[in-house]
Image (spheres, rainbow, N blue to C red):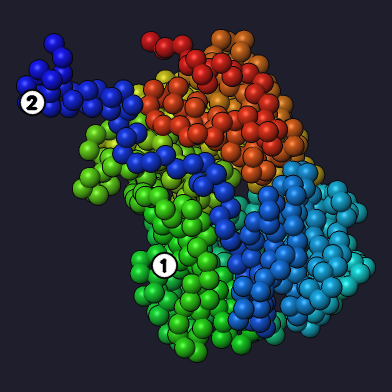
Amino acid sequence: MSCSHVPLRLAWLLLLAAWLASCAMLGPSETRSPVIPLPVLFGGGDRGAGTLSPDGRQIAFVAPHGREWSIWVAPTDKPEARRAVVTDTNRGLRGFMFSASGSHLLYVQDDTGEENDRWFAVDLATLRTVPLSYRGVRAKLAGLSGQFPGEVLLEMNERDYRQFDLVRVSLADGSRRTVFENTGFSTVITDGQFRLRYAVAQTDEGGSRWFVRTGEDWKLWSEVPQADALGTRMLGLSADGRTLYTLDSRGRQTAALYAVDTTTGTRRLLHADPQADVDDVIRHPVTGAVQAVSTHYLRQRWVALDPEFALDLDRLQKFAAGGELNIRMRSGDERTWVIGIDRADATTKVYLYDRSSGVAKLWYDTQPALARYDLVPMHPVEIRARDGLVLPSYLSLPPGSDLNTDGRPEQPQPLVLLVHGGPWMRDTYGLDSTHQWLANRGYAVLSVNFRGSTGLGKALANGGDKEWGRKMNEDLLDAADWAASQGIARRDKVAVMGASYGGYAALAALSMSPQAFACGVSVVGPSNLISFIEAVPGYWDPWLRTYSSRVGDPDTVAGRALLAERSPLTHAQRIERPLLIGHGTRDPRVKQTESDQMVQALQRNGVPVVYVVYPDEGHGFGRFANRLSFNSVTERFLRQCLRAGAIGTVGWRDEESTIWIRAGESFLTKGFPVRP
C-alpha cells in the first residue's frame, strides 16, 4: 500500500511514532539544541584579559593575530588604534600587566610545560623585548612600585631549586641584583620601597610561623596552627607600610579580613561572613587601602568598606543585574575602571567604566561566537553528605530538559560528576566552558565542593585531612546518590571526571567503589600517592609538609601504609568500569609514570582503558589543538560509556595536535564490551 492511500490520521500517527523512535535512539537531550563546536566552546574568543595602565591612558588585551595569539595595546580613548606587541607561537601567555609607569608591558610564559615561568618586559616605545629571568628558572612576581618605575621585584629559584631568592631586575636591560637570599621562607612580603617586612615559614606540622623584619634580623611574630593554615595568610601592605592586611580564621569558622597596625601590632576586624571565607578584596590603586570585600558561598556577595566606594559599587551592582561583578583594574586617579560582568548562561562582557559620568561602555564580549548559542543556567544547590556536612555545589542541565526551569529535569539524565583539582581550591558560580560543553552534549553536570575544598570555612576544608579516597570519595558517592534521588540522574549512567586531584578522585572512585560509576575520566591524576609525593619538584618543598599533615606522611611507617592504602593503584584489580586517562609527558607535578602504571594494571586485568599522551604538554593541556583533540576523545568516550550524548564534528586527528593514543583507540569507535 502506498503512502497516498494511508488515511491522514494514520499517516500522522506513523510520522509521530517515527519521530519519537528517532528521539529514543538519540538519547534524552540530543535533539533539543544545536551542537556547539568545540573551537567555539574552548577557543579564546575574539578578545580577553583586558587591563589598564596605571595612568589610565592605555589598554591591553589578548586577541588573535593570524593563527597565533597576541597581546595588543591601544590608547584608552582609541581602542581601534591597537598594535600587537607580543605574539605567542607555543603554549599560550600565562599573564601580563603594565609596569608601574606604564612604559613597559610585562608578560610571563611557560613555553615547555615544565612550569618554569619566565618573565619578559616589552618597551612600548620601541617594542624591544628584554628577558627578566632565565630559561629553566622558575620566576614569580613579587612586587611593582611607583617608587621604582624602571624595576620589578621577582622571586627566582636560580641559586637553589628549592628556594626563591628576591631579585630586583631592570626593565631596560634585564640586569639584576639579589636583595635577599632565601634559606627557608615560603613567602616574603615587601613594602612600596621594596624593603623586606614580613616572611612566612612552614612548620613540620603543616602550619606556619610568621616573622617580622627588625633591622637585619627576623623576629617571630605569630604562629598559625595546621587547622587554620588553609585560610590564614598575609595579603600585603598599604602603600605607606603602616597597615598589613591579613585573612585569618584563628578563633573563628571562616577566614575574616583584618587590618594590622604595623607599629603597634593591634588588629582590627574589617569583615567576616559566617558561611564563607573572604574571597577577594578591592584596594585603592594608589594608597593600597581596602575599599571593598567579597565572599562566595553559593553566589558572590560584595560589601563596601569605603563609603565613597559604596556609591560606585551600588551603581555597578545594579548595572550587573544579577550577574557576578568583577572589578579588574582601576587607573590611579580612579576615573577609569575595567569591569567584567559574568553570568553562568551568557558570555562575559567587559566594560570601561567612567566614574565621573557613571557610564559603563562595552569594551568587548569575550566569546561572541558562543553568544550565538543557547547557554544553560547553573543552579547553586546544597547537598547534605551522609554525616550531615553541607556540600555547596553547582548543577547544569541539558538544554530543553528542564521545561519549568526549576532546576530539575523532566526525566532523569545521564550525568557527569565533575571533580575540581587541588584539592585545596573550590568550584564557584559562573560561566563554565566544561559545564556548557557537557550539558550541550546531553549530560547533566554536577560540580561538588567536597570536604577538602577551601573558601567555605574550616569544617569543610579540614574535613578532608587524611580522607583522600575515604570521606572525600564518599562525598562524591553521596552527590551522585542525591542527583538520582532528586530525579536528576539515572544512577547507572553517572560518570566521574576530573584533572589533577580530580583525576585522582576519578581513579579512586572506580577502584574503591567499583560499581558506583559507569566510567571515569582522569587527567594527570596520581595513582600511587607514595611515588607521586616522592617525585614532586624541589620548589614544592614547603607544600610537602601540607601533604604530610593532610594526606599522609611518607617518612613514617604508618604514613606510608596510609598512602599505599589510599592509592588507586593498590586497588586497581577491583576496577570494573572503563577509564579514559590523559597525561602530558613534561608534567613536573604528577609524573607520566603515574598514568603509565595504572594503564598497565588495567590492561593486565582486562579493563577497557583509553590512554592519551601529549609529548609537548605538562600538568594540563595548554596548546589549543591538544585541548580540542582531548575533548573530542572525551565526548566520544562518554558517548560509548553512557550510551547517550552527542558528539561534535571536530575529530582528534587535527594535524596541529600532538595527540598519541597509546591504548584503546578502537573503543572510541567500536564501543566497550557491554557490562552485565
| Side (left or right) of 198 relative to 322 | right
Amino acid type of the residue tagged 1 in the rendering? Arg
In the rendered image, residue 455, in percent from the top left (x then y), is placed at 50, 56
> What residue would you read off at disc 2?
8
**In what quadrant of the picture does the N terminus appear?**
top left
Q: Characterize the local packing of mark 1: few (<14), some (14-19) or many (20 or more) Cα atoms within 10 angstroms.
A: some
Q: Nearer the viewer, residue 202 or 22?
A: 22
Quadrant assignment, res 408:
top left
Q: Residue 12: x percent and y percent?
A: 12, 27
Residue at position x 18%, y 25% in the image? 15
> For the residue labelled by badge 1, is the local secondary structure a helix, a strand or a loop?
strand
| Disc 1 to disc 2, C-alpha distance | 59 Å
Q: Quadrant of residue 181?
A: bottom right
Residue nearest the viewer, comparing 392 with 625: 625
Say if 80 sits above or below 157 in the image. Answer: below
| Residue 649 visible at all | yes
* Quarter of the image with the C terminus in it: top left
From the viewer's perspective, is the residue at label 1 or at label 2 nearer?
Answer: 2
Given contact means CB atoms under 8 Å apart, are the residues at marks 1 and 2 in contact? Answer: no
- Could you tell me which secondary element the residue under label 2 belongs to? helix
Counting residues from the start of the chain, the first of labels 1 and 2 encountered is 2
Q: What amino acid is labelled 2 in the image?
A: Leu
Q: What residue sits 88% from the left and 55% below the top?
A: 134
- What numbered label is drawn on residue 301? 1
Q: Is residue 247 above or below residue 626?
A: below
